[in-house]
Image (cartoon, grey):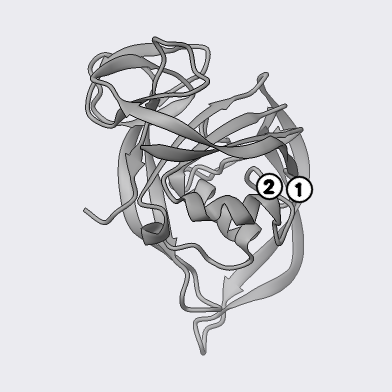
Amino acid sequence: MKLLHVRLEGWTATFRLPLLYSGTGLTSPLPPYSTLLGLMGSLAGHEIAAGEIRSIGFVFASEGVAVDLETTWCFEADRRTGRLKSKTQRGIAKRQFHVRPKLDLYLDNLNLLAIFEHPANPPCLGRSQDLAWIVGNPEEVEATPVEEGIVRGTLLPFPEPNAGGLILRLPDYFDNSDLGYTRSIEKLGIYQAIKHDAPARIHRTGLFSVTGLPNDEAIYLHSLMPS
């Protein structure tokens, strides 16, 4: 089969942990699938539904993490309508971020080539200030199913007995159709974060050998379709 391969790089990246937000804002070691969908929706200039990309694979790496201070804007729910509105108070918070991130995307929808060639907005790896750029030209690559391979810099469904990694509960995608209201999680999964510098050899479905990777390495192609 053929996949669309895109390489992005940036100065910083921040992947918020949706179920942990107290004190210092920690970043996930790897981007949730919902963040990758949001990235592509920004490039397209409209929301991209999970069904438009049936499967997605990625390899993420960075040179480390650091912590910065940031001004925050507060919101509250209007008591009468329930809609969000801004408050006058500002705050300050610590934010953890990745330094010099690199992201390789592998998409099964080849028609998305146009959003990377002519993006509607600058690519961002997390927040709007985490600006990134596309390296080289997006390309089609050959992907061959394999039963076993070395994976790195990606999320695997938990449990994966042949790999270590932080266990995270992360969203695949959200429903943001009610404007002015908080979005709702439509699909939530439990994953193991396999860091780029801690690869693992695994045996499972969804592994593919891809043009450009070493012979013993593979990517995990994750299904975004509803369970």
Is residue 75 something one can see in this rendering? yes
Q: Indicate left or right for 11 with 159 as reference.
A: right
152 or 127: nearer the viewer = 152
Q: Secondary structure at mark 2?
A: loop
Q: Is residue 163 visible?
A: no
Figure quadrant of the N terminus: top left
- State the image quarter where residue 146 is shown: top left
Residue carrying label 1: 129
Question: In the rendered structure, which amino acid carries the disc numbered 2?
Answer: Cys
Q: Name above or below for residue 124 compared with residue 167.
A: below
Q: Name the residue at 57% across, 59% down.
A: 41
**Residue at x 51%, y 18% (from the top left corner):** 196
Q: Are marks 2 and 1 in contact (CB under 8 Å)?
A: yes
Q: Distance from label 2 to label 1 (Cα)? A: 7 Å
Name the residue nearer the viewer: 108 or 30.
Answer: 108
The location of residue 203, given as percent across then percent down, is 23, 17
Badge 2 density bin: few <14, some 14–19, many ≥20, Cα 10 Å: many
